[in-house]
Image (cartoon, rainbow, N blue to C red):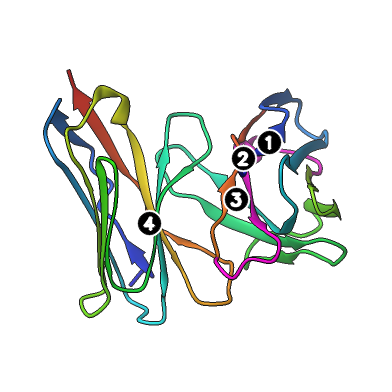
Amino acid sequence: QKEVEQDPGPLSVPEGAIVSLNCTYSNSAFQYFMWYRQYSRKGPELLMYTYSSGNKEDGRFTAQVDKSSKYISLFIRDSQPSDSATYLCAMSFYGNNRLAFGKGNQVVVIP
Amino acid sequence: GAVVSQHPSRVICKSGTSVKIECRSLDFQATTMFWYRQFPKQSLMLMATSNEGSKATYEQGVEKDKFLINHASLTLSTLTVTSAHPEDSSFYICSATKLATSTDTQYFGPGTRLTVL
């Protein structure tokens, strides 16, 4: 079993819809959880960063962490064509800079 | 801000040559820099972790003599792909973490696309 599982998609949604992405993980020691957005042929850009369980909201983006289920989610409200990208979840342990990445989920928002 | 740059953004070389890729943190000091490679439609695979002033730590299966890493300062790390072959063609991305922070956020560079003919 991989450390981090993420369905690669692709996921196509109409403009204005809610995009729902998720990752599961196997190691309960993970404490920091991140979502990165990567446009084609570019480096990943940090979108959301959360510590332990809970919700975090930033504009149209909401990140949720459920440590009991080892499950994290990213929601994008009122999706825009500019949100079309690959979204990667990542996580790490306290005091350890190494990130474990999911495979990435390609999202296409259709105008 | 937390800006990381990479140079070059794209390089094409002949098989057997060596290629050097630079990674710079522009507006912060980076305690640690990381080097990843990414194949099309795949996730990032960590190659090595680089701390300023010490030897890089390579992931299992990554040849340290082929992928030379030098972390010369708190703002610069270089990756040299020695005797490159077509199978080394990939997207190489570096990232950096800030000095004196208790979080583990990594800030990524824009990547370097290497094509070996």
Report the residue marked by disc 1: B5
Please give left or right for residue B50 compared with residue A39 in the image. Answer: right
**Front position among marks 3 and 1:** 1
The N terminus of chain B is located in which quarter? top right
Q: Earlier in the sequence, mark 2 or mark 1?
A: 1
Q: Circle 2: is it few (<14), some (14-19), or many (20+) Cα within 10 Å? A: many
Work out whether disc 2 and disc 4 sit on a shared chain: no
Report the residue marked by disc 4: A102
Report the residue marked by disc 2: B109
Q: Which residues are magenta?
A: B81-103
What is the C-alpha distance between the residues marked 3 and 4? 14 Å
* Image position, residue B109 (x, y; %): 61, 40
Q: Residue at x 68, y 36 (%)?
A: B5
* Image position, residue B84 (x, y; %): 75, 39
Q: Residue at x 56, y 66 (%)?
A: A98
- Label 2 close to label 4 by CB (< 8 Å): no
- Above or below: residue A75 compared with residue A29: above
Q: Circle 4: is it few (<14), some (14-19), or many (20+) Cα within 10 Å? A: many
- Above or below: residue B8 compared with residue B77: above
Question: Quadrant location of residue B51?
Answer: bottom right
State whether residue B70 appears in this view: yes
Q: Earlier in the sequence, mark 3 or mark 2?
A: 3
The C terminus of chain B is located in which quarter? top right
Work out whether disc 3 and disc 4 sit on a shared chain: no
Q: Earlier in the sequence, mark 3 or mark 1?
A: 1
What is the C-alpha distance between the residues marked 2 and 4? 19 Å
**Front position among marks 3 and 2:** 2
